[in-house]
Amino acid sequence: MAEVEYFGGIEGGATHSKMVILSSKGDIMAWSEGPSTNHWLIGVDQCVTTINDMVVDAKKQAGIPADKPLKALGLSLSGGEKEEGQKQVIDGMRTKFPNVSENYKMCTDTFGAIATACEYGGMVLIAGTGSNCQLINPDGETHGCGGWGHMMGDEGAAYWIAHKAVKYVFDADDNFQDPPSDTSYLKLAMYEYFKVNDRIGLLDHLYRNFDKSKFAGFCKLVAQGANEKGDKLCQIVFTQAGETLGRHICALSSKIDKSLLEGEGGLQVVCVGSVWKSWDVLREGFLRGMLPRNDRDVAIKTITLLELKQSCAIGAANLGARSIGMKLPVKYAENASVFFSHTFS
């Protein structure tokens, strides 16, 4: 009987990280958690130290000796896009912590989401504080749209929604541009959320003490207005957000392998981020945004939207195993659930 081998996977975020150890039989052996593993934010030295701490903790829980290396460790990390950064992290792990793993595979956090829910490739569309869309075709070829941050992108995400809502209030009060509906709810919500009495008071939050996460948090009140209070302008903002999210998929449509479009359920899209909780008010705009805009775009016949039920750490472990030619028996159907499916007429 072949010896059981162990594979690790880390889902690394800007504030929080999670690790899993899987056996070669696909069994979950242990979980562990840690702080940020984004090497752009905390530096390579702290990143590799945090990774080691998480692995040591998970090995202890799984009953694996600390000095027994994992067969492979997949690192699906925020900030993990560039090859130079990947090399620095992996070299740091091999030098400082040689007993962590025999092999490594590092990639950006979006790829782990796809590998958690989709066996032969697919698409992930993130709409959290920021937005990003990534496609992985069955041959491993990758394409992306967005992910450029709030200065150059983040369309349809929480920051974008909050900014759009605040701009409607500012423009209406300046008589610069008429809003598509009354701003009364948004103005009051804006003053209450930022704890200011007028627009001048908001300038501190916009410039001197700007905090992207804090500003994006105003999206929650816009969502409440749209979902719970029936505010027309909030609903319009979310319809616009849905359209821009759908446009991410449309932008990549010509790059999608035919097999991903023609399989059961059509194109599988893993949806990550809190903005998707407001799907009911995103839906109309989202479907409109997916429609071809020109002869370069490809019409997508059927789409299925998936919500993850498991951490992307499982996908990271999966990618680690694949990188050395091994296939883990991942239970894809149990890792995600369908929350929407649509066939265009």
Image (cartoon, helix red, strand yellow):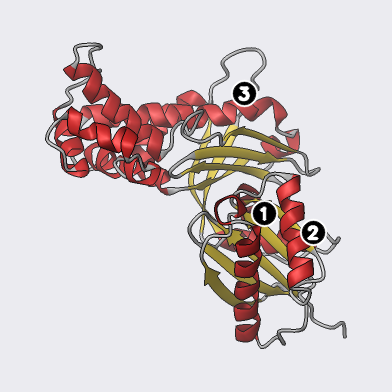
Classify 40 as above or below 5.
Answer: above
Sequence-first tag of 2 and 3 = 3
Evaluate if marks 1 and 2 touch, with contact meaning CB atoms under 8 Å apart.
Answer: yes
**Judging from the image, what secondary structure is the residue with disc 2 in?**
helix
Q: Earlier in the sequence, mark 1 or mark 2?
A: 1
Q: Please state the horizontal and vertical placement of residue 77, each as a whole percent of the image.
A: 62, 54
Image coords of residue 128 (percent x, y): 44, 45
Distance CA(mark 2)–CA(mark 3) = 32 Å
> Callout 3: helix, strand or loop?
loop
Pointer 1: residues within 10 angstroms few (<14), some, or many (20+)? many
Looking at the image, which is closer to me, 239 or 81? 81
Q: Is residue 91 left or right of residue 240?
A: right
Q: Left or right: where does residue 174 sit relative to residue 273? A: left
- Asked if residue 24 lies left or right of residue 210, the reply is right
Residue at the spot 39% in from the left edge and 41% down from the top edge: 212
Within-10-Å neighbours for mark 3: few <14, some 14–19, many 20+: some
Q: Which residue is mark 1?
A: 115
Q: Which residue is mark 2?
A: 322
Residue at the image point whose x is 79% and y is 59% from the top: 322
Q: Are dots 2 and 3 in contact, CB under 8 Å?
A: no
In this rendering, the answer to whether 292 lies above or below 266 is above
Q: Amino acid at mark 1?
A: Ala
The amino acid on which the numbered mark 3 sits, given as a three-letter code, is Ala
Earlier residue among tags 3 and 1: 1
Task: Report the residue marked by disc 3.
Answer: 299
* Whether residue 266 can be seen here: no
Q: Nearer the viewer, mark 2 or mark 3?
A: 2
Name the mark nearer the viewer: 3 or 1.
Answer: 1
Of residues 283 and 33, the one drawn nearer to the viewer in this rendering? 33
Is the N terminus in the top left, top right, bottom left or bottom right quadrant? bottom right
